[in-house]
Amino acid sequence: MSAALVPLAPLLLVAATAGLVILLDLLPPREGKGHLGIVALAGIVAALLAALSLWGREGRAFGGMLLLDNFALFLDVVICYAAALVLLLSMDYLRRNGIETGEYYILVLLATLGMMLMAQAADLIVIFLALELMSLCLYVLAGFFRGLAAAESSMKYFLLGAFATGFFVYGIALIYGATGTTALDRIAVASGGLRGDPLLLIGFGLLLVGFGFKISSVPFHMWVPDVYEGAPTSVAALIATGSKAAGFAALLRVLFSAFKVAQPDWTLLLWVVAVLTMTVGNVVAIAQSNLKRMLAYSSVAHVGYMLVGVVAGGALGAGGVLFYLLMYTFTTVGAFGVILLLERGRREAVELDDYAGLAARHPVLALTLALFLLSLIGIPPTAGFAGKFYLFGAAVRSGYIWLAIIAVLNSAVAAYYYLRVVVYMYMRESEGVPTEPAPSFAGRLALGIALWGVFQLGLMPAPVLDLARAAVAPLLR
Amino acid sequence: MTFLPVLGAVILALLPRRRAALVRWFAFLVAAATFAVSLLLYTGFDAASADYQFPERLPWMPSFGISYHLGIDGISLLLVLLTTFLSPLALLSSWRAVEDRVKEFSISMLLLETGMLGVFVSLDLFLFYIFWEAMLIPMYLIIGVWGGPARIYAAIKFILYTLTGSVLMLVAILALYFQHGAATGTYTFDLPVLARYVVPGGAQVWLFLAFAVAFAIKVPMFPFHTWLPDAHVEAPTAGSVILAGVLLKMGTYGFLRFCLPLFPQASLAFVPWIFLLSLVGIVYGAWVSMVQPDLKKLVAYSSVSHLGFVMLGLFTLTPQGIVGGIIQMVNHGLSTGALFLMVGILYERRHTRLIADLGGLWKTIPAFSVLFMIVSLSSLGLPGLNGFVGEFLILVGAFAWASGQPAAAPLAYLVPVLATSGIVFAAVYMLWMYQRVCFGEITNEANRGLPDLTGREWAVLLPVLLFIVWIGVYPRPFTGMTEASVQALIAQVQSKAAVAAVGVGTR
């Protein structure tokens, strides 16, 4: 590999694996594509290791369109973890539901490629291309079940996503018109002399709308519950974690490097958005009886918490967001993973009733889900607590005391609906057909890894947070 | 020592589920071993010193100034002992009451014990908060899984109340951390270091309020007490014992350990309000107790009243008042714990807790009735038993405080006078309850032929009674342990308040 390509190693590994899986898919056997999952997983793990080994390197490629820094590497790691866990969960799940095809693995790989590209993009055009690559794959994946709900899920995701893309491109066009460039660092230079320029302001606003859709912040969150509900649970987990990490990667880079001068303006705007996002997410989640919808609204609420970190800014705020993304990946993939393993009479156990009395029959699985939910609430010593502690700590440090107070009260509200699942599992008796877990070694392995992550980050958060703070250092220069 | 119960819980998780007897014995022995270890703390404790003793300190997140810092002083020593003392008894008491999922129950109890011990021995605010929060979950499960008919409602109410309070405290902890860091240059969560820093006036009030709300919910002070009767009534006996015996003390301990030394000026400013709420709690708790038809509810509301006394004693900021408050925390843990144990014993026999269904028990189960009498008398503060010592010291403290307030002379004396009325009401509701339960003719045929106390029940109750009498007759071994720390605390509060007052004066 030539030296110029070294910064791209993680990306190239994923791309090469995708190509390999496409080729292998053409070869026999026609049925049973499980081996493709293992190949895809190996590729992702290789990319993960590559990203870890490149830590500390800096570089650019393709004339500055792509760059490699610790920030990109940290997010590459987050995204690879998300993709690897989702692949592990998918293997038996697809077979069980009769949708095991090579395309699934190819699309997951390409979506992952798009996400990592977003983390490494240094130019609005590349961000746009990466966003499209990721989104198009996810649109298809969301409809993989071929039912009515899946079609609705896919269609809704596609239409709203396409709209968002429209806003995004228009924003890029206006910014280009105002500054004459699409490279983030040159926008930063140009926008210094353009404070209050309407063209730039509108372009920036439209860009934020596009990001709002992708990270599902209020008021652009409407698609989330339907998409999560109709999509295969493994895909919902990928959308909730990987695509969000990618969205935040690009958002943080755009905000902190390209539009640094406008920080007071967007801080105020995002303050309001953060409050709305977490409050709406938590309040609506209370009313859900379907676990996938509940996790969908809860994911909206968690975006609100992460926006608190963005508002707070600084190494602690932005680093806190990165830490939160990593912990959220472990926790959420874990929670979706338990749902995905459980079946009640030939269908997936997604209703609260399906969880009644689970602890009596499957204590280990129930405890696992309970621990993930506790982490989502933010009860120590799980990772969720450490994540919230850093984010809210950053808010307090930057003087946003009220924002921190609203955020912690929101976490208390959230405790209600997460604990309701625990109530069903531990304190109710089951009726009718029992809910049983599907036998899946890969699935259990994924849950084990996620649980390890939740406790590793919960008990020893400091080393990872120090890495996260180091990762945002290049942005804040 | 703190993590001995966790270790036990881990081993317990590996034991076979079907061997319930083995699980019970093992859990009990772990808790008993923890108590034995904690006795070493007592014998090794230097009562003359006000410093934190048996310190353990390891860096945990050095970049944040968070360390694993444990230590105990005279204030926490007695509470640690109370926790380790009550936990094995609570486990022993539930051998018949908890029949299903014994293993999970025992694990929850042991985890709970670690959480409580952690709260009392942490000297790092971050660590303290972790234990404080982590302890909620086992208690939530104990109420929600092994509780009475309305257990789910009670469990959710318990956790939402306490969680709301404690997340506000988290913001306050963070604010204190950054303020201290900005002012002194060292960012740390270490309590002894933070306690040396005088928080500026306005911020101090807000921080005090955030901490105070979290602790007041836990105590619980009027008007934050509504979760308590629900939680107590629905919790299984062992849960009630721990809840009343130890959990409530975490609130009062929090005031003593954090609010007073960290925010002395604000604490002093809020003394009238604390007194008002404490008095309302004392009188209201007593009145409401009087009309309860359910034994457990009666004891629960009496806790509101007793904890009002504790708060009153602590905020007199006199040596007598604070020592009395600490002793009263222990007393309440023993007396109310014993009351809940005995109500539980009664419930196992009669499957009712309604006073109206009982009566004439003296004739059928005399040994039970005698012990119940002693415990009731200790709860209402009969001289010679433990309750008297605590309440007496608190009232002495309150009078001392009142005599130090010449500006509000007649009004200030209302505080001890009203508090004393609480003791009178306590006598009314306890004795009246006792009379209806144990004396009179047997009105309900189901009360005939009840078996008296078993050997295991004697084993649970006798140690508690031993301490009830011991503290009542000769409290010196207990009060002596606390005095040096209390003196140091008062000196610290006054000097810091004086510094702050000078600061305000020169501005």
Image: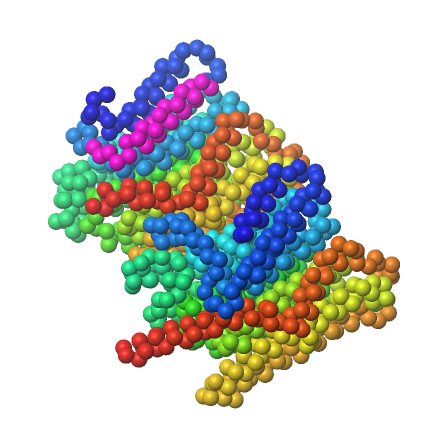
> Which residue is at 70% across, 65% downward?
B465
Residue, x 52% and y 89% (percent of image)?
A: B410
Decide whether the magenta segment is chiefly helix, strand or loop.
Answer: helix
Foreground pick, B396 / B505: B396
| Of the pair B270 and B492, the residue shown nearer to us | B492
Q: Is residue B490 above or below residue B70?
A: below
Bounds of the magenta span?
A34-59
Q: Position of residue B56 (x, y in %)?
A: 45, 54
The quadrant holding residue B350 is bottom right
Left or right position of A411 against B182: right
Residue A109 point in image, percent of width and height: 36, 26
In the rendered image, residue B332 lying in the magenta stretch gets the answer no
Looking at the picture, how far across and down is residue A365, in whole percent?
56, 36
Residue B127, by quadrant, is bottom left
In the image, is residue B334 above or below residue A319? below
Does the magenta-highlighted stretch encompass residue A40?
Answer: yes
Quadrant holding the N terminus of chain A? top left
Q: Position of residue B502 (x, y in %)?
A: 32, 78
> Which residue shows up at 57% across the image and 42% down it?
B10
